[in-house]
Amino acid sequence: MSVTVRIPTYLAGFAGGSSVLRIDSGPTNVREVLDALWQAHPALRDRIVDEQGQLRQHVNIFVGDEAVAWNEGLESKVYDGAEVLIVPAVSGG
Amino acid sequence: MPAVQHLSVKNGDVLLLVGTMKGAFFVRSDKSRKKWSVGGPYSAGSPVYALAYDGRAGRNRIWWATQSFRWGTFLKTTDDFGKTSTEPETYSVKFPEQSGLALKNIWQISAPASRPDKLYCGVEPACLFESSDNGATWTPVAGMLNHPHRPKWMPGGGGLCLHTIAPHPDDPQSTVIAISTAGCYRTDDGGATWEPKNKGIRAVFLPDQYPEFGQCVHKVARAAGQPDRMYLQNHWGLYRSDDGGESWNDIANGVPSDFGFPVVAHPQDPDTAYIIPVESDEYRCTPEGKLRVYRTRNAGESWEPMTSGLPQKNALETILRDSMATDMLDPAGIYFGTRSGKVYGSSNEGKSWDVVIEGLPPVVCVRAVVVGDGAGSTRSSGGAAKTKARGGTASTTTKMSAKSSAARNTKAAARKSSSKKDARRSR
């Protein structure tokens, strides 16, 4: 099973310049997708989750069209061919 | 994003490090401190609550903390005044997983001249981090991380932040820190243990108004050359300690309000300190619409408003706890930034003021440094500088400085301890 992860331009600078990353390690949920992501691109971890492994407050992850916040958080299931989207939330001031 | 402007800086220049809610700016002048040029913004779009200059061991390194709304809080450095800067792969200031804590913000960076191998960070949630390898790695100070009072500390309006780091310049084992809302703590064993040092400091918002800890201390400044003396601006209350924090005495003599955020100590004279009172903990603006810096030259026995060049009508300004600093020159330069995005400066110890820069985002941090002087942390509310002989680095003002120094000595000798607490406050 493989999934495609799309990350914003800012984060692509910490992933070899690519905004589209393929995970082929057979992840079954978002947490496993992220773990594979950290293995390949360690600099992404601190920017997406905090020390406790919690998704940063103003970062959203979608599996397809579904925000993980509305589902099971990082335990949300992924499926073969899924597109996982990591996006900055509307925030700031 | 705005185009970034870079500065050309040379040794001997005065540099202001200005943190705002939308990035950091570097502002330079020569020693006259009359004409200023601006570099930045750096980390544009992100709040920068903490900056520091590390001029030790021949470095010219500026540290700052970027609090990205999205991507977390991390430290950055530049060794060429912003032309290039670090972009860390992994963040260096992090709580251990087993602590259950996660970093929200870095409120203070300290590079003390007296401890050339140390760097410190004060963070939110309240903790002290230290580095012994020039900032390559950072660890939480265990005695602070595991402090038995931690479960009872409560966040103030700005969060549960450790905002003041005041190392003792002569005793490497002793450091005072301050937390909102927990109060002052002091270690005398290099950070292994920390004792609350809040005797005499009021907590108006608690049933017991003089608790062992839990005070909302806004800022502490250690006096130059007299390290057991400290000035403290509280959430209601202005205090001085002459015994390293063992006891605190009310010194709000003749100020329009004893509420405020910053306090800075003069870089040479232990009897001189500066504050900017604001009105009440609900309003938090300068009283009567007048922007007034108050200066004491007798360790708090009296305070005088320093207003020349500052607006005295319709100036509803707020100056936050780290938005005031002094340089190390003689006469001392005093600087402060407002939430309305202005930075004011005085090159004559507060006698007169000029706008250094305006139109910035809200200012949350100001630091001042003389580039290449080999010093560590810039003079700020929490700094700890050693006494420098008053030597007249600005020749045109030597006469004035000598005169004012003599006057201060006379006043200091005549100082009496007095208690006038009830007449002091305007609520």
Image: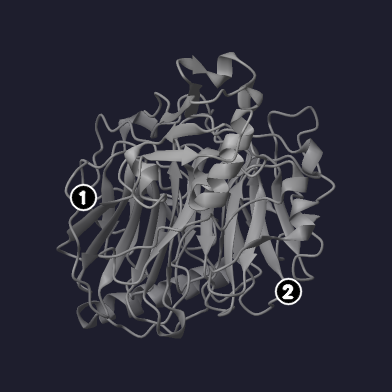
A21 shown above or below A69: below
Left/right placement of residue B203 relative to residue A92 reads right
Give the residue type that dot 1 points to: Ile
Mark number displayed over residue B234: none
Nearer-the-camera pick, A91 or A50: A50
Q: Amino acid at mark 2?
A: Gln
Give me the residue at 54% from left, 39% from top: A24
Q: CA distance from mark 1 to mark 2?
A: 40 Å
Q: Work out whether residue A58 or residue B319 is closer to the camera in this orientation and state it.
A: A58
Q: Position of residue B13 (x, y in %)?
A: 25, 74
* Image mark 1: chain: B
Q: Give the SS element for disc 2.
A: loop
User: Residue A36's spot in the image, x, y percent?
Assistant: 58, 43
Residue B312 point in image, percent of width and height: 26, 37
Question: Which image quadrant is residue B159 in?
Answer: top right
Mark 1 lies on a secondary structure that is strand
Going by the picture, which residue comes out furthest to the front? A1
Residue plotted at (54% across, 28% down): B427
Instruction: Identify the disc placed on residue B173.
Output: 2
**Residue at x 29% of width, y 36% of height:** B340
In the image shown, does B62 or B357 lie closer to the viewer? B62
Mark 1–mark 2 CB contact (< 8 Å): no
Whether labels 1 and 2 belong to a single chain: the reply is yes
Q: In the drawing, what numbered circle is on residue B357?
A: 1
User: On the picture, is B348 further left or further right than A1?
Assistant: left
The answer to whether residue B419 is visible is: no
